[in-house]
Image (cartoon, helix red, strand yellow):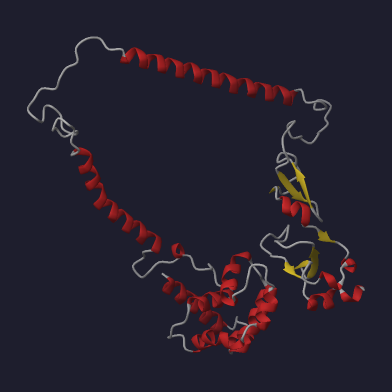
Amino acid sequence: MFAEYQKQVLDFYKRKWNSGDLSLNLMHPTSAKIKSECLLVFEKRSKRKDETMLRSFFSADPTADFRLIIKKFETDKFKPLNNYLKNSTGKTEEKNIELLAWLIDFEPRPFKPENFVDEQGNSEQSEKKDSADSELSWIEPEVAETETTSEDPSGLTSGTSGDEMGQPEPTSIGPTDVAPEEDKKVSGNTVGRKMVLAGILLVCIGGIAAFLLWPGRQAGEVSPPRAPLGSEEECMYWTGDRYQAIACSGKTDGTRLYALDKDKLMHLQKISRPDTISRRGVGHVWYAKIDGKIEFYTSAGFHPVYTDIRLKPLTLYMYNKYIYHYQ
């Protein structure tokens, strides 16, 4: 299925090339230009879904500063992709196709088998299902045969009735206690269900009464709902410069709630005064570029509002460019 994905990525590249929608680096590519384009694209649109591909191509760890990694990356390692673009009839590694898809903003990416079909219209996922069904069709008769041919000590198969052997089935004689016992179980279950339903009904009635008798409601006051006594704060929200823990039912103004993350709660804060950042903050302070402005944070992770943007570690270059003049 990757062959179909590769074809669509290349066709997309050719269409953009013919329409002049590619950058100058990709209109007439060289290994050095592809490297430069990687830097530009990373600064312009760094998305979470591309991280696995970038780590794989550049052999980087999850906390690496990709900007530095790309700058130090050997230019010759872009040569296979450059050769492929100049001679598209050849073959290249899958990682080069994924990098090209990222550079030209092809969607959907990265490659997922279920998104692409072959010339017969079959996806890899459907092929696996058909294969599994085929195997199951061979297994089922064998299982059925095993169930019906197991022997008991009398020499008769357990799946064969007395009629099939030419003998009448034995008839039980005398009273049995099975039916009364089953009646008792059914009766007990019915009583239990009724008690559960009655309890639920009482809880609902109590909730409605509490709402109607809520202090201040009749006077037109609106009070924020409070978490039940004894409940734990299992959610948090972004206040603008830090996360604040709160009960999951504690916000009504449309504020976005997140599952409580104690690490973010304790360590991730926005640095509102860049002049407080010294050179020792290089590698220990994190930043993101939002609407053309640089925001600084105290911990790694993703931007608390634009959650698809990863925070990057502060480099000496960024420090000199955006912070040094404050000192």
Q: Please name the residue shown 36% across and 14% down the image.
A: 181
Q: Please name the residue shown 73% across and 57% down the image.
A: 304
Q: Position of residue 191 (x, y in %)?
A: 49, 16
**In front of the other: 74 or 157:** 157
Q: Please name the residue shown 43% across and 85% down the image.
A: 90
Q: Position of residue 37 (x, y in %)?
A: 64, 82
Residue 156 location, quadrant: top left
Looking at the figure, which quarter contains the N terminus? bottom left
Q: Is residue 294 above or below residue 145?
A: below
**In front of the other: 278 or 135:** 278
**In front of the other: 255 or 193:** 193
Residue 284 location, quadrant: bottom right
Q: Is residue 161 above or below residue 243?
A: above
Total numbered labels placed on residues in the image: 0
Q: Position of residue 152 (x, y in %)?
A: 18, 33
Residue 206 location, quadrant: top right
Q: Position of residue 231 (x, y in %)?
A: 72, 35
- Residue 305 falls left or right of residue 93: right
Q: Please name the residue shown 86% across and 62% down the image.
A: 272
**In front of the other: 205 or 156:** 156
Q: Determine if residue 12 is in view.
A: no
- Residue 288 falls left or right of residue 140: right
Q: Determine if residue 43 is in view.
A: yes
Query: Looking at the image, which residue sits at the far front?
Result: 153
Query: Looking at the image, which residue sits at the far top?
Result: 175
Looking at the figure, which quarter contains the C terminus? bottom right
Query: Looking at the image, which residue sits at the far left?
Result: 166
